[in-house]
Amino acid sequence: MLYRRQNTYKIYQIIIVILGLILTSPFAKICVAKEKLIISAIPDQNPEKLNRLYSTLADELSNNLQIKVIYKPVINYQAAVSAFRTGSLDLVWFGGLTGVQARIQRPGSIVIAQRDIDSKFHSIFIANHKSGIKPISNLNGLKVLKGKRFTFGSESSTSGRLMPQHYLTKAKLKLSDFKGGVAGFSGSHDATIALVKSGSYDSGVLNEQVWEERLAQGRVDLKKVYPIWRTPPYVDYHWLAQPNLDKHLGKGFTRKLTNTFLSYDKSNPRQKIILELFGARSFVKAYAYQYEAIEDIGRKLGKIR
Amino acid sequence: MAVIIGNLHLGGLNTLFRFFISSFTPSLNSQVLQSAWNGLQVTFGFAILAWSLSLFLGVLLGLLGSYNLCSFFNISPVIATVIRRTLTVPRAIHEVLWGLLILQICGLSPWIALVAMTIPYTAHMARVFSEQIDNISLKELIAIKLTGSRNLESLITAITPKIIPIIATFGFYRLECAVRGATLLGIFGLGGIGTELQLSLMSLQFNQMWTSLWMLFISLFLLEKAIEWIQQPKFYINNTGVYTITFISSLIFSILISLLLLNYLGINFFEGLHFTPIHPPNFYRFIEAFKSLNWVQLILDTLILTFVASCIAIGLPPLIFMNVHSNIGQGIVSIILILLRLMPAPLVIILLLLSTTPSTSVVALALGLQNLGVLGRILRDNINKQGDQLFNSVLSTGATNSNAWLYGRFIQESISYLSYSIYRTDIILRETIVVGAVGGVGLGWQLQESLSSFAWEEVILISIVFVCITLIGESINEQMQKALLGIKRTNQFSMLKI
Amino acid sequence: MNSLIELNNVSLYNKSGIRLKGINISINCGEKIALIGSSGAGKTTLLKLANGTIFPTHGEVRFNGLSISKLTHKQRLKIGTLWQDLRLIEELSVCQNINAGALGRHNVTWSIANLITGININECSKYLRAANLPVSFLGRNIRDLSSGQKQRVAISRLLIQRPEIILADEPLSNLDQFLANKILNTLLSVNTDSTINTAKTCIISVHQLDVLQNFTRVIGIRSGQVVIDCDTTDLKDIDLRNLYN
């Protein structure tokens, strides 16, 4: 009897140890030294493309920099900014507005690079064929949108909201001038195309790059939805890095990182894929001062406080 | 509804058609499948963790917040009231906002996602449980107590068998909500199937969207069947103790499995905590924020939106069940209900907008439809739980199927259905945050806008308004319940002053 | 000081008016009391006052000289109640329900064990048999029983409590003549096997007047007032007629 009891006691001990191991195993990795770069992006792509893009990019960066690179897909614009602020993300692909918001909240952050197309980025206003809106030649022509149903893309988008709203304001058009007293927010560039095409909205505005891509893919029916105006150029997306990367990952790391991006070239097959998925020919150097105009506009429209 | 029919147009039929056709040709690209599968596992892992945590805390707070038990233990009901009122704060604030708030302070870390999900879920469960516990008749408890047994033993014997069915219906159904609510994980860079869905929605990649939708559909369908099986009264009647113990041990087991699974998928809890204090909000900017918003319009819009959506969500399920009797019909209804629950509200809004012009009613319809899926399910579950005697006896009087359903089945459940519907309006109110597409409608939209501008003062003010609306709604609801069940409640009280 | 339950000038008012008025009853140890009166006269209310479920608006109820509201659970164990609505826990089995009557003599672990499996089978079977139900009923669910069977389960629960006084509200209502007599005998601890020691004292509300001779004392209530309170032998037909008119 006593023997049996001791035996069961032993079994209990073993079970407790196993349970303890299972419970603590998730935390076991905490102790591993931090020699890694965490990258993220505010994604406006489909998941399949994102997976290809960022797994390739993480591999390539890790190869170039000889460091572990982890991609964390933060899908919410505000969350990406906040996570950058708290230092949880080292390198983030931000839009114009979100990048400025992030830099204000994390002073000293370093603008690393942008795509060749980002220094002269455009938004494009589109209209439904039934709306009777004719293509316009200059900014003041935007007045034809008065009394029409109009939609932006997502609230935090530079090309789908901030800059278009800036030009609308310049043309002395208030958001309350649209039909229904408000402008819609379709949530994404593709949704803007679909909703204007269907006629739910008479007109909308989106990222020119997306528009060109969809045209090339044959997914836009120009008889039903056509461009009416292209905005003047402005700067948009860019890579933004934490101010303290040199300290954590070795002196000159930020410089090395910038150079890596600048060196990406279509002759390298993997880099070619990356550039193609980014819709760019190459990455170019970007500077914080390029985004001052965006900051001003953001402040004027209340998107930067 | 009428407004929507009036605004119908055919412009988007093409896209709508493409959406439905795509359901037959989901993307089978290996990367899409792989990431959706991974996403599904992550989602389920987190859903189970958040759900079990919130179930545990919810039952605990629910017991503390019930007037019945307070009076039983001779504690002043003020404590129950305080607990209930305090719980409105976590409930009135959307989990996304909780997520963003904690993220602001603590940085990206998997356990924060868990906390952000658990906070509103716990509060919601606590409310449902405390009110359901208050609806339990205390006669048996009093009888047991009067045999001379102490409080704890009486409670265990008389109340556990009555709470278990409540947990079995509402508790399990929340697991499904947790799976659907796991889109929040995207905020923390954890992926999950909700994130896949949201991304493919943003790019209107219907084929890829259907890959996730089908996967989610199949897993939720299986989950629902499994839950239906577990919920069978035959398991817990006569068997409360074994059921409870099996339940608790399987809960612990699934928590362990989820932890292991998430670990395997590369998610380490407690990694990457970066505590970063935030600037204290500025009083001057509060006043500025207060002045800058058109509160009356915003609140009015929100209330109308919530009201219309609630009407759709609450009113339709009884009508549907009343008129569908054949087995095939019921099967179809239950599939439609799953689909309604499955589709994220933004997706429904876009689909609706494809053939209507934007208006508040579109948003209300989208919100209403999703919640209709939920309420319909609850009603069906509850009705399936009851016996057939009353229904058959009404039927035998020569009543039509519809009437027999109404008198024989619905009447028995009407009070608990209505009281659950009222909790649901809270959720609908909270979900008005997703109405961006139509633009400028209500507080929810303004909250998104303020969040994206990092205008924390506005965010705080709007959240306070949300809390206030919820509080007012709750006390009105309690007054109504008191009027309905008042006599019963007072009787129980006087019996309890032992 | 040998009166077990005392109702001193007890009145009860509620929203719908006066339920009981000026009741003075003193029940001594060993008395077998029949409580009679037409429906709605206040029999149930009186029993609820006596067991402390409700409290009087005026007057006081004492058990063993102590105010009924201040009893400890040990003292409460001595009062057994058979409710008119039985108050069985529908979700539990017969055995678990019977054990629920014995909770006062056991601890928490026991009550949890009772929920998990049927325990205390021997004692349960004994009391189940005393209430004229076969032992095979132990595992059955309350919902599957007929009302007469439920009534007998409730009686088993009452008996397992081993109370000193039984307050039974119409225990015979759902039973046929034969069973009614047997159950009544059990409650009044006549002709039962000696291992079951039922209470020496009981108050039982009944509708059947032909059983009155089994009791020692009769209390009749009409419109909330005691109109008959005498030994069974002194009961007059005229009083009975008055009571029901």
Image (tube, coloured by chain):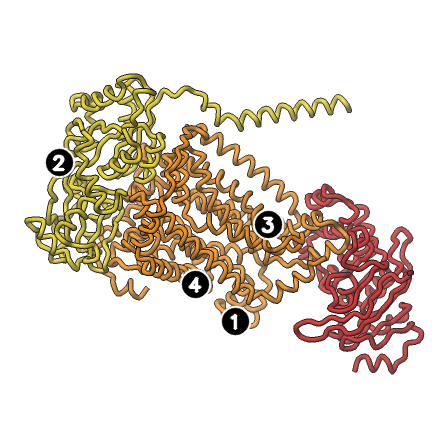
Q: Check the picture and name the quadrant holding the C terminus of chain B.
A: bottom right
Q: Nearer the viewer, mark 2 or mark 4?
A: 2
Amino acid identity at mark 2: Lys
Q: Chain of mark 4?
A: B
Where does the image place residue B377, in percent across and percent down from the top left?
47, 54
Density class for disc 3 (Cα within 10 Å; few <14, some 14-19, many ≥20) is many
Q: Nearer the viewer, residue C167 or A252?
A: A252
Which residue appears farthest toward the right when viewing the image? Answer: C233
- Label for residue A120? 2
Secondary structure at numbered mark 2: helix
Disc 3 residue type? Leu
Query: Element at badge 1?
Result: loop
Chain A is shown in which shade? yellow
Q: Within 10 angstroms of label 2, few (less than 14), some, or many (20 or more) residues?
A: few
Do the dots labelled 2 and 3 sit on one chain? no
Same chain? Circles 3 and 4: yes
Residue A281, given in percent of the width and then of the height, sits at: 15, 29
**Above-or-below relation of B150 to B409:** above
**Numbered disc in front, either 3 or 4:** 3
Q: Colour of chain B?
A: orange
Q: CA distance from mark 2 to mark 4?
A: 53 Å
